[in-house]
Image (cartoon, coloured by chain):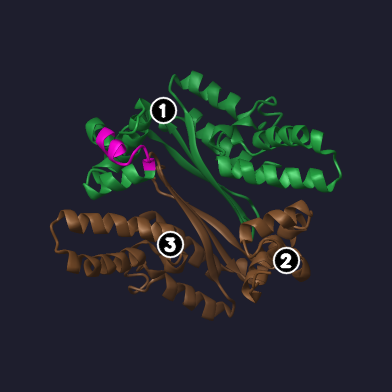
Chain colours: A green, B brown
Protein backbone atom coordinates (compact mmCIF):
# COMPACT_ATOMS: atom_id res chain seq x y z
CA UNK A 1 0.00 0.00 0.00
CA UNK A 2 1.35 3.39 -1.02
CA UNK A 3 2.33 5.88 1.65
CA UNK A 4 -0.45 8.51 1.60
CA UNK A 5 0.47 11.92 3.00
CA UNK A 6 -1.93 14.04 4.99
CA UNK A 7 -1.32 16.81 2.46
CA UNK A 8 -2.52 14.61 -0.43
CA UNK A 9 -5.66 13.70 1.51
CA UNK A 10 -6.29 17.39 2.20
CA UNK A 11 -5.69 18.33 -1.45
CA UNK A 12 -8.01 15.61 -2.68
CA UNK A 13 -10.65 16.68 -0.19
CA UNK A 14 -10.47 20.27 -1.34
CA UNK A 15 -10.63 19.24 -4.98
CA UNK A 16 -13.50 16.80 -4.64
CA UNK A 17 -15.29 17.59 -1.39
CA UNK A 18 -15.38 13.88 -0.57
CA UNK A 19 -15.00 12.70 3.04
CA UNK A 20 -11.61 12.10 4.64
CA UNK A 21 -11.93 8.32 4.78
CA UNK A 22 -13.13 8.17 1.17
CA UNK A 23 -10.20 10.31 0.07
CA UNK A 24 -7.76 8.11 1.97
CA UNK A 25 -9.06 4.92 0.47
CA UNK A 26 -9.23 6.42 -3.05
CA UNK A 27 -5.60 7.53 -2.75
CA UNK A 28 -4.59 4.12 -1.44
CA UNK A 29 -6.39 2.38 -4.30
CA UNK A 30 -4.80 4.81 -6.79
CA UNK A 31 -1.38 4.24 -5.19
CA UNK A 32 -1.00 7.93 -4.53
CA UNK A 33 -1.90 9.05 -8.06
CA UNK A 34 -4.06 12.17 -7.54
CA UNK A 35 -5.71 12.19 -10.99
CA UNK A 36 -6.59 8.53 -10.65
CA UNK A 37 -7.96 9.06 -7.13
CA UNK A 38 -10.28 11.80 -8.45
CA UNK A 39 -11.48 9.37 -11.12
CA UNK A 40 -12.16 6.70 -8.51
CA UNK A 41 -14.20 9.11 -6.41
CA UNK A 42 -16.15 10.11 -9.51
CA UNK A 43 -16.89 6.47 -10.22
CA UNK A 44 -18.24 6.10 -6.71
CA UNK A 45 -20.24 9.30 -7.10
CA UNK A 46 -18.40 10.98 -4.26
CA UNK A 47 -16.81 13.75 -6.25
CA UNK A 48 -19.97 15.49 -7.33
CA UNK A 49 -21.15 16.48 -3.86
CA UNK A 50 -17.65 17.61 -3.94
CA UNK A 51 -17.66 20.78 -5.84
CA UNK A 52 -20.68 21.96 -3.88
CA UNK A 53 -18.98 21.66 -0.54
CA UNK A 54 -15.79 23.13 -2.03
CA UNK A 55 -17.69 26.23 -3.05
CA UNK A 56 -19.09 26.78 0.43
CA UNK A 57 -15.68 27.04 2.01
CA UNK A 58 -14.35 29.70 -0.27
CA UNK A 59 -15.53 33.22 -1.06
CA UNK A 60 -14.10 35.81 -3.38
CA UNK A 61 -14.46 37.53 -6.71
CA UNK A 62 -13.88 36.88 -10.38
CA UNK A 63 -12.93 40.16 -12.08
CA UNK A 64 -11.95 41.03 -15.63
CA UNK A 65 -10.04 43.77 -17.32
CA UNK A 66 -10.29 44.47 -21.03
CA UNK A 67 -7.77 46.83 -22.57
CA UNK A 68 -9.25 49.82 -24.44
CA UNK A 69 -8.21 48.27 -27.77
CA UNK A 70 -10.51 45.32 -27.10
CA UNK A 71 -7.76 42.92 -28.09
CA UNK A 72 -6.26 42.10 -24.69
CA UNK A 73 -8.26 40.75 -21.78
CA UNK A 74 -7.64 39.31 -18.35
CA UNK A 75 -9.78 37.22 -16.00
CA UNK A 76 -8.70 36.70 -12.38
CA UNK A 77 -10.12 34.76 -9.45
CA UNK A 78 -9.24 36.08 -6.01
CA UNK A 79 -10.35 34.21 -2.92
CA UNK A 80 -10.95 35.27 0.65
CA UNK A 81 -12.71 33.72 3.63
CA UNK A 82 -16.01 35.57 3.93
CA UNK A 83 -18.63 37.10 1.70
CA UNK A 84 -18.33 40.26 3.80
CA UNK A 85 -14.73 40.83 2.72
CA UNK A 86 -15.46 39.72 -0.85
CA UNK A 87 -17.99 42.56 -1.12
CA UNK A 88 -15.74 45.21 0.39
CA UNK A 89 -14.29 48.04 -1.71
CA UNK A 90 -10.75 47.29 -0.54
CA UNK A 91 -10.95 43.72 -1.75
CA UNK A 92 -12.48 44.72 -5.08
CA UNK A 93 -9.83 47.41 -5.59
CA UNK A 94 -7.11 44.85 -4.99
CA UNK A 95 -8.71 42.42 -7.46
CA UNK A 96 -9.03 45.15 -10.12
CA UNK A 97 -5.44 46.24 -9.64
CA UNK A 98 -4.22 42.67 -10.10
CA UNK A 99 -6.20 42.35 -13.34
CA UNK A 100 -4.85 45.66 -14.67
CA UNK A 101 -1.32 44.58 -13.82
CA UNK A 102 -1.60 41.25 -15.63
CA UNK A 103 -2.98 42.99 -18.74
CA UNK A 104 -0.11 45.44 -18.92
CA UNK A 105 2.86 43.64 -17.36
CA UNK A 106 5.98 43.83 -19.56
CA UNK A 107 6.45 40.09 -18.99
CA UNK A 108 3.00 38.47 -19.05
CA UNK A 109 2.89 36.09 -16.08
CA UNK A 110 2.36 32.41 -16.80
CA UNK A 111 1.93 31.23 -13.20
CA UNK A 112 0.55 32.70 -9.98
CA UNK A 113 3.65 31.67 -8.04
CA UNK A 114 7.02 30.20 -8.96
CA UNK A 115 6.11 27.09 -6.92
CA UNK A 116 3.56 26.17 -9.57
CA UNK A 117 6.07 25.80 -12.39
CA UNK A 118 5.96 22.17 -13.40
CA UNK A 119 9.11 20.11 -13.71
CA UNK A 120 8.46 19.56 -17.42
CA UNK A 121 8.08 23.31 -18.11
CA UNK A 122 11.27 23.94 -16.20
CA UNK A 123 13.10 21.21 -18.13
CA UNK A 124 11.85 22.61 -21.45
CA UNK A 125 13.19 26.06 -20.49
CA UNK A 126 16.45 24.45 -19.36
CA UNK A 127 16.89 22.79 -22.75
CA UNK A 128 16.30 26.07 -24.58
CA UNK A 129 18.76 28.00 -22.39
CA UNK A 130 21.34 25.20 -22.54
CA UNK A 131 21.23 24.91 -26.30
CA UNK A 132 21.39 28.68 -26.71
CA UNK A 133 24.42 28.95 -24.43
CA UNK A 134 26.09 26.05 -26.24
CA UNK A 135 25.35 27.53 -29.68
CA UNK A 136 26.85 30.80 -28.51
CA UNK A 137 30.09 28.89 -27.96
CA UNK A 138 30.13 29.14 -24.15
CA UNK A 139 32.54 26.59 -22.62
CA UNK A 140 30.75 23.49 -21.32
CA UNK A 141 31.95 23.94 -17.75
CA UNK A 142 30.19 27.29 -17.35
CA UNK A 143 27.04 26.54 -19.37
CA UNK A 144 25.36 24.91 -16.35
CA UNK A 145 26.01 27.97 -14.19
CA UNK A 146 24.74 30.38 -16.84
CA UNK A 147 21.63 28.25 -17.34
CA UNK A 148 20.90 28.07 -13.59
CA UNK A 149 21.03 31.84 -13.40
CA UNK A 150 18.78 32.21 -16.43
CA UNK A 151 16.30 29.68 -15.05
CA UNK A 152 16.05 31.53 -11.73
CA UNK A 153 15.49 34.82 -13.52
CA UNK A 154 12.89 33.21 -15.82
CA UNK A 155 11.01 31.69 -12.86
CA UNK A 156 10.77 35.14 -11.27
CA UNK A 157 9.74 36.79 -14.53
CA UNK A 158 6.81 34.45 -15.18
CA UNK A 159 5.48 34.34 -11.60
CA UNK A 160 2.76 36.92 -10.97
CA UNK A 161 3.42 37.25 -7.22
CA UNK A 162 7.08 38.09 -7.83
CA UNK A 163 6.33 40.91 -10.26
CA UNK A 164 6.45 44.58 -9.32
CA UNK A 165 3.04 46.17 -9.92
CA UNK A 166 3.17 48.14 -13.18
CA UNK A 167 1.65 51.17 -11.44
CA UNK A 168 4.88 51.81 -9.60
CA UNK A 169 3.90 55.30 -8.42
CA UNK A 170 0.52 54.27 -7.06
CA UNK A 171 1.90 51.14 -5.40
CA UNK A 172 5.37 52.42 -4.45
CA UNK A 173 7.17 49.70 -6.36
CA UNK A 174 5.58 46.92 -4.31
CA UNK A 175 5.33 43.39 -5.71
CA UNK A 176 1.97 41.68 -6.23
CA UNK A 177 2.81 39.47 -3.24
CA UNK A 178 3.43 42.52 -1.07
CA UNK A 179 0.08 44.00 -2.14
CA UNK A 180 -1.60 40.66 -1.45
CA UNK A 181 -0.06 40.52 2.03
CA UNK A 182 -1.22 44.10 2.66
CA UNK A 183 -4.88 43.42 1.76
CA UNK A 184 -4.74 40.22 3.77
CA UNK A 185 -3.49 42.14 6.82
CA UNK A 186 -6.04 44.91 6.31
CA UNK A 187 -9.02 42.54 6.02
CA UNK A 188 -7.72 40.04 8.57
CA UNK A 189 -8.42 37.20 6.13
CA UNK A 190 -6.35 34.89 4.04
CA UNK A 191 -6.38 36.35 0.50
CA UNK A 192 -5.28 34.14 -2.35
CA UNK A 193 -4.90 34.77 -6.07
CA UNK A 194 -6.34 31.47 -7.23
CA UNK A 195 -5.82 31.68 -11.02
CA UNK A 196 -5.89 33.98 -14.02
CA UNK A 197 -6.20 33.94 -17.78
CA UNK A 198 -4.62 36.43 -20.19
CA UNK A 199 -5.77 36.49 -23.80
CA UNK A 200 -4.36 38.59 -26.61
CA UNK A 201 -6.04 38.31 -30.01
CA UNK A 202 -3.92 36.00 -32.13
CA UNK A 203 -1.45 35.56 -29.29
CA UNK A 204 -0.64 32.81 -26.87
CA UNK B 1 14.12 11.80 -41.80
CA UNK B 2 10.57 12.06 -40.51
CA UNK B 3 7.75 12.67 -42.95
CA UNK B 4 6.76 16.33 -42.39
CA UNK B 5 3.25 17.27 -43.48
CA UNK B 6 2.38 20.60 -45.06
CA UNK B 7 -0.20 21.02 -42.30
CA UNK B 8 2.47 20.72 -39.59
CA UNK B 9 4.63 23.30 -41.36
CA UNK B 10 1.65 25.65 -41.60
CA UNK B 11 0.75 25.10 -37.92
CA UNK B 12 4.31 25.73 -36.81
CA UNK B 13 4.46 28.85 -38.96
CA UNK B 14 1.27 30.21 -37.44
CA UNK B 15 2.47 29.45 -33.95
CA UNK B 16 5.94 30.89 -34.30
CA UNK B 17 5.90 33.23 -37.31
CA UNK B 18 9.18 31.68 -38.49
CA UNK B 19 9.83 31.24 -42.24
CA UNK B 20 8.66 28.17 -44.15
CA UNK B 21 12.13 26.73 -44.69
CA UNK B 22 13.05 27.30 -41.03
CA UNK B 23 9.84 25.57 -39.95
CA UNK B 24 10.52 22.63 -42.26
CA UNK B 25 14.03 22.13 -40.99
CA UNK B 26 12.99 22.54 -37.35
CA UNK B 27 10.29 19.89 -37.80
CA UNK B 28 12.74 17.59 -39.56
CA UNK B 29 15.28 18.03 -36.76
CA UNK B 30 12.53 17.45 -34.17
CA UNK B 31 11.37 14.36 -36.08
CA UNK B 32 7.89 15.83 -36.36
CA UNK B 33 7.53 16.71 -32.66
CA UNK B 34 5.77 20.11 -32.67
CA UNK B 35 6.71 21.15 -29.12
CA UNK B 36 10.34 20.27 -29.79
CA UNK B 37 10.30 22.15 -33.12
CA UNK B 38 9.06 25.30 -31.33
CA UNK B 39 11.91 24.91 -28.84
CA UNK B 40 14.44 24.59 -31.67
CA UNK B 41 13.16 27.76 -33.32
CA UNK B 42 13.37 29.56 -29.99
CA UNK B 43 16.96 28.43 -29.60
CA UNK B 44 17.72 29.87 -33.02
CA UNK B 45 15.85 33.06 -32.12
CA UNK B 46 13.34 32.56 -34.90
CA UNK B 47 10.27 32.16 -32.76
CA UNK B 48 10.24 35.63 -31.27
CA UNK B 49 9.65 37.51 -34.54
CA UNK B 50 7.04 34.89 -34.54
CA UNK B 51 4.37 36.11 -32.30
CA UNK B 52 4.58 39.54 -33.89
CA UNK B 53 3.78 38.27 -37.37
CA UNK B 54 1.12 35.96 -35.94
CA UNK B 55 -0.65 38.96 -34.49
CA UNK B 56 -0.76 40.78 -37.81
CA UNK B 57 -2.67 38.03 -39.55
CA UNK B 58 -5.48 37.82 -37.08
CA UNK B 59 -7.96 40.41 -35.86
CA UNK B 60 -10.76 40.08 -33.36
CA UNK B 61 -11.87 40.83 -29.84
CA UNK B 62 -11.33 39.62 -26.31
CA UNK B 63 -14.55 40.10 -24.34
CA UNK B 64 -15.54 39.27 -20.79
CA UNK B 65 -18.74 38.66 -18.93
CA UNK B 66 -18.98 38.79 -15.16
CA UNK B 67 -22.15 37.49 -13.54
CA UNK B 68 -23.97 39.95 -11.26
CA UNK B 69 -22.87 37.96 -8.20
CA UNK B 70 -19.24 38.71 -9.04
CA UNK B 71 -18.34 35.06 -8.49
CA UNK B 72 -18.55 33.74 -12.06
CA UNK B 73 -16.61 35.19 -14.96
CA UNK B 74 -15.86 34.36 -18.58
CA UNK B 75 -13.17 35.54 -20.98
CA UNK B 76 -13.46 34.75 -24.70
CA UNK B 77 -11.27 35.42 -27.71
CA UNK B 78 -13.08 35.64 -31.04
CA UNK B 79 -11.13 36.09 -34.24
CA UNK B 80 -12.01 37.50 -37.63
CA UNK B 81 -10.04 38.67 -40.62
CA UNK B 82 -10.14 42.46 -40.49
CA UNK B 83 -10.10 45.21 -37.94
CA UNK B 84 -13.17 46.65 -39.69
CA UNK B 85 -15.28 43.61 -38.80
CA UNK B 86 -13.72 43.35 -35.33
CA UNK B 87 -15.02 46.85 -34.58
CA UNK B 88 -18.52 46.27 -35.93
CA UNK B 89 -21.55 46.08 -33.66
CA UNK B 90 -22.62 42.74 -35.14
CA UNK B 91 -19.30 41.12 -34.30
CA UNK B 92 -19.23 42.56 -30.80
CA UNK B 93 -22.81 41.42 -30.17
CA UNK B 94 -21.88 37.91 -31.23
CA UNK B 95 -18.83 37.93 -28.95
CA UNK B 96 -20.89 39.18 -25.99
CA UNK B 97 -23.58 36.56 -26.58
CA UNK B 98 -20.97 33.79 -26.60
CA UNK B 99 -19.54 35.04 -23.28
CA UNK B 100 -23.00 35.22 -21.69
CA UNK B 101 -23.76 31.71 -22.90
CA UNK B 102 -20.57 30.23 -21.44
CA UNK B 103 -21.25 31.90 -18.08
CA UNK B 104 -24.75 30.47 -17.83
CA UNK B 105 -24.65 27.20 -19.76
CA UNK B 106 -26.12 24.29 -17.77
CA UNK B 107 -23.09 22.23 -18.78
CA UNK B 108 -20.05 24.52 -18.66
CA UNK B 109 -18.09 23.85 -21.85
CA UNK B 110 -14.56 22.55 -21.51
CA UNK B 111 -13.55 22.78 -25.18
CA UNK B 112 -14.42 25.02 -28.12
CA UNK B 113 -15.09 22.04 -30.37
CA UNK B 114 -15.31 18.28 -29.85
CA UNK B 115 -12.26 17.90 -32.16
CA UNK B 116 -10.09 19.44 -29.47
CA UNK B 117 -10.75 16.74 -26.89
CA UNK B 118 -7.41 15.08 -26.27
CA UNK B 119 -7.06 11.32 -26.42
CA UNK B 120 -6.00 11.22 -22.76
CA UNK B 121 -9.08 13.21 -21.64
CA UNK B 122 -11.28 10.88 -23.67
CA UNK B 123 -9.60 7.81 -22.18
CA UNK B 124 -10.00 9.19 -18.65
CA UNK B 125 -13.73 9.71 -19.30
CA UNK B 126 -13.95 6.23 -20.81
CA UNK B 127 -12.42 4.69 -17.67
CA UNK B 128 -14.90 6.52 -15.44
CA UNK B 129 -17.92 5.48 -17.54
CA UNK B 130 -16.66 1.92 -17.88
CA UNK B 131 -16.08 1.46 -14.16
CA UNK B 132 -19.44 3.02 -13.34
CA UNK B 133 -21.27 0.72 -15.75
CA UNK B 134 -19.38 -2.27 -14.40
CA UNK B 135 -20.08 -1.34 -10.77
CA UNK B 136 -23.75 -1.01 -11.64
CA UNK B 137 -23.62 -4.68 -12.62
CA UNK B 138 -24.14 -4.18 -16.35
CA UNK B 139 -23.13 -7.29 -18.32
CA UNK B 140 -19.66 -7.01 -19.84
CA UNK B 141 -20.88 -7.47 -23.40
CA UNK B 142 -23.03 -4.34 -23.33
CA UNK B 143 -20.74 -2.14 -21.22
CA UNK B 144 -18.73 -1.10 -24.29
CA UNK B 145 -21.88 -0.01 -26.13
CA UNK B 146 -23.22 1.93 -23.15
CA UNK B 147 -19.86 3.62 -22.70
CA UNK B 148 -19.61 4.59 -26.39
CA UNK B 149 -23.00 6.24 -26.16
CA UNK B 150 -22.07 8.05 -22.97
CA UNK B 151 -18.77 9.22 -24.47
CA UNK B 152 -20.53 10.66 -27.52
CA UNK B 153 -23.02 12.47 -25.34
CA UNK B 154 -20.24 13.75 -23.10
CA UNK B 155 -18.23 15.05 -26.08
CA UNK B 156 -21.26 17.04 -27.23
CA UNK B 157 -22.01 18.32 -23.74
CA UNK B 158 -18.53 19.73 -23.19
CA UNK B 159 -18.05 21.25 -26.67
CA UNK B 160 -19.11 24.90 -26.82
CA UNK B 161 -19.96 24.89 -30.54
CA UNK B 162 -22.37 21.97 -30.10
CA UNK B 163 -24.35 23.67 -27.33
CA UNK B 164 -27.69 25.36 -27.86
CA UNK B 165 -27.46 29.03 -26.86
CA UNK B 166 -29.03 29.46 -23.43
CA UNK B 167 -31.11 32.39 -24.70
CA UNK B 168 -33.30 30.03 -26.67
CA UNK B 169 -35.99 32.62 -27.39
CA UNK B 170 -33.61 35.28 -28.63
CA UNK B 171 -31.61 32.80 -30.72
CA UNK B 172 -34.42 30.46 -31.74
CA UNK B 173 -32.75 27.39 -30.27
CA UNK B 174 -29.68 27.75 -32.51
CA UNK B 175 -26.37 26.19 -31.49
CA UNK B 176 -23.26 28.31 -30.96
CA UNK B 177 -21.89 26.86 -34.21
CA UNK B 178 -25.03 27.98 -36.08
CA UNK B 179 -24.68 31.48 -34.63
CA UNK B 180 -21.00 31.50 -35.57
CA UNK B 181 -21.83 30.47 -39.14
CA UNK B 182 -24.47 33.21 -39.30
CA UNK B 183 -22.11 36.02 -38.22
CA UNK B 184 -19.49 34.64 -40.59
CA UNK B 185 -21.98 34.76 -43.48
CA UNK B 186 -23.19 38.23 -42.49
CA UNK B 187 -19.69 39.73 -42.27
CA UNK B 188 -18.27 37.71 -45.15
CA UNK B 189 -15.28 36.75 -43.02
CA UNK B 190 -14.05 33.64 -41.33
CA UNK B 191 -15.08 33.94 -37.66
CA UNK B 192 -13.47 31.66 -35.14
CA UNK B 193 -13.96 31.20 -31.40
CA UNK B 194 -10.31 30.83 -30.52
CA UNK B 195 -10.48 30.06 -26.79
CA UNK B 196 -12.28 30.84 -23.56
CA UNK B 197 -11.83 30.69 -19.81
CA UNK B 198 -14.62 30.18 -17.25
CA UNK B 199 -13.89 30.81 -13.58
CA UNK B 200 -16.21 30.24 -10.66
CA UNK B 201 -14.96 31.21 -7.21
CA UNK B 202 -13.77 28.05 -5.48
CA UNK B 203 -14.71 25.98 -8.52
CA UNK B 204 -12.79 24.22 -11.24
The residue to which callout 1 is attached is: A85
Look at the image and tell me in which quarter the N terminus of chain B lies: bottom right
Q: Nearer the viewer, residue A167 or B145?
A: B145
Q: Secondary structure at mark 1?
A: helix
Which residue is painted at 25% across and 59% down in the image?
A: B130
Marks 1 and 3, how far apart at CA = 42 Å
Q: Nearer the viewer, residue A177 or A171?
A: A177
Percent coordinates x, y for residue A37 in the rendering: 32, 42
Which residue is painted at 53% across and 70% down in the image?
A: B90
Q: Is residue A32 magenta?
A: yes
In the displayed structure, does residue B175 sit left or right of residue B11? left
Label 3 vs 2, first from the N-terminus: 2
The residue to which callout 3 is attached is: B119
B204 shown above or below A79: below
The residue to which callout 2 is attached is: B23
Which residue is painted at 29% across and 36% down in the image?
A: A28
Percent coordinates x, y for residue A189 in the rendering: 43, 22
How many neighbours does mark 2 have within 10 angstroms: few (below 14), some (14-19), or many (20 or more)? many
**Which chain hosts label 3?**
B
How many neighbours does mark 1 have within 10 angstroms: few (below 14), some (14-19), or many (20 or more)? many
In the displayed structure, does residue B182 sit left or right of residue A82? right
Marks 1 and 2, how far apart at CA = 52 Å
A71 shown above or below A135: below
Amino acid sequence: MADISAKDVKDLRERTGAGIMDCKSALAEAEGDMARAIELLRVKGQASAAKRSGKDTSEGLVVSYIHATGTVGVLVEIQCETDFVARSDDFRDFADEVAIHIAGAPSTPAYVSADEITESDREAERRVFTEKATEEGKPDDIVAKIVDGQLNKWAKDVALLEQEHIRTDRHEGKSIEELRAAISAKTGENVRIARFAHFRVGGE
